[in-house]
Amino acid sequence: MFLLPLLAFFPARGQGKDLLLRVLLREVPPGQAVRLALPSGEVRASAGGEGVVLEGRVAPSFDLEVPYFSLEGRPYRGGVRLLAQGGKLLVINLVLLEDYLLGVLPGEMPEGFPLEALKAQAVLARTFAVNRLNPKAPYDLCASELCQVYLGFAAEKPKHAQAVAATRGQVLSYGGKAISALYHADSGGMTAGSEEVFQKALPYLRPRPDPYAKGPKSAWRVSVSKEAAEQALRALGYTPKGEEAPQVLERSPSGRAWRVRLMGVEVWGPEAQRLLRLMGLPSALAEFQGFEAVGRGAGHGVGLSQWGAKGMAEAGFDHREILGHYFPGTFLSELLLAGVP
């Protein structure tokens, strides 16, 4: 694939100073090659015994300083770094923060959501990214749901771009530092405290009523097979001791499962919530009727509820009020005021 015709679709952004992010796009296994389309044409790269092999040249790494490129047919803004590590080839996008967000919002929140909800999401995605800056690591972020979904240039939409531009440089801060900007799909009516899921209590991530969350997973019913329950226990290192159906014996402050008994085994705390997710349940805000689960919400429940943000925006709240509701005590700050160099 030759990318020169795409040049007309990559406008000069003229955004001035911006942070450069390193986003891992792909880990290529040993012995496999990857194709990159650059403005000058296509190149192939792989990891070899001496480092990165790029069109017959070998080096520990290569930085391709281009305005855009395509990886296996998917275009991205910015340049690309090729780095060999552990026998694998790491393909890393070197992209400006604001350009990165243009490819993140389409993967995290539908364009049909109200603009104020999208603006809140843009602030959180930006805060999440700058909080992951790590000069000592080979990259800052990955492109999957393990970090934030990053889809590159082809996914960009005008309304998402409007939300990014309207909040340019804005992050949430607490105590002069960018916060841990967590979000999820649907709280089921009550968000969770950070310690319920991630073991660390943060003052701005407390259980919050979420009456505006009305999404497709706000109420659900899921049947769990005995095989799935057994696999979930074993994935956490437990050995089933019977065929007993799941029971929630204790709940967290937000109402999520905190102590669960299943097949003769009791699981506590954040691990109990992991157990329910491994069993295929959308959230841990659930109860059991035999091997059938009835529950509310989708995701871990900490921080901003995306469907709740949608409902608040539709009710007339702006993005500042939305963020203030889900992250009490935080400030909407510029990057420098949030401790970001």
Image: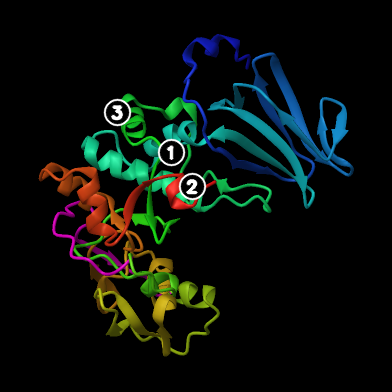
- Secondary structure of residue under mark 3: helix
Q: Position of residue 153 (x, y in %)?
A: 48, 27
Kind of residue at badge 3: Lys
The secondary element bearing badge 2 is classed as helix
The residue positioned 13% from the left and 42% from the top of the image is: 314
Q: Amino acid at mark 2?
A: Ala
Residue linked to disc 1:
104
Please tell me the numbered disc located at residue 159: 3
Question: CB atoms at circles 1 and 2 under 8 Å apart?
Answer: yes
Residue beneath disc 2 = 129
Q: Nearer the viewer, mark 3 or mark 2?
A: 2
10 Å crowding of disc 2: few (<14), some (14-19), many (20+): many
For disc 3, the neighbor class at 10 Å (few under 14, some 14 to 19, many from 20) is: many
Q: In the rendering, at what x and y percent does residue 93 appear?
A: 61, 35
Q: Is residue 182 left or right of residue 43?
A: left
Q: Secondary structure at mark 1?
A: helix
- The residue located at (64%, 38%) in the rendering is 92
Q: CA distance from mark 1 to mark 2?
A: 10 Å
Q: Is residue 318 above or below residue 147?
A: above
**How many residues crowd mark 1 within 10 Å: few (<14), some (14–19), many (20+)?**
many
Quadrant housing residue 199: bottom left
- In the rendered image, residue 242, in percent from the top left (x then y), is placed at 43, 89
- Mark with earlier residue (1, 2): 1
Query: What kind of secondary structure does the magenta stretch mostly adopt?
Result: loop
Instruction: Answer whether residue 209 is visible to the viewer in this image.
Output: yes
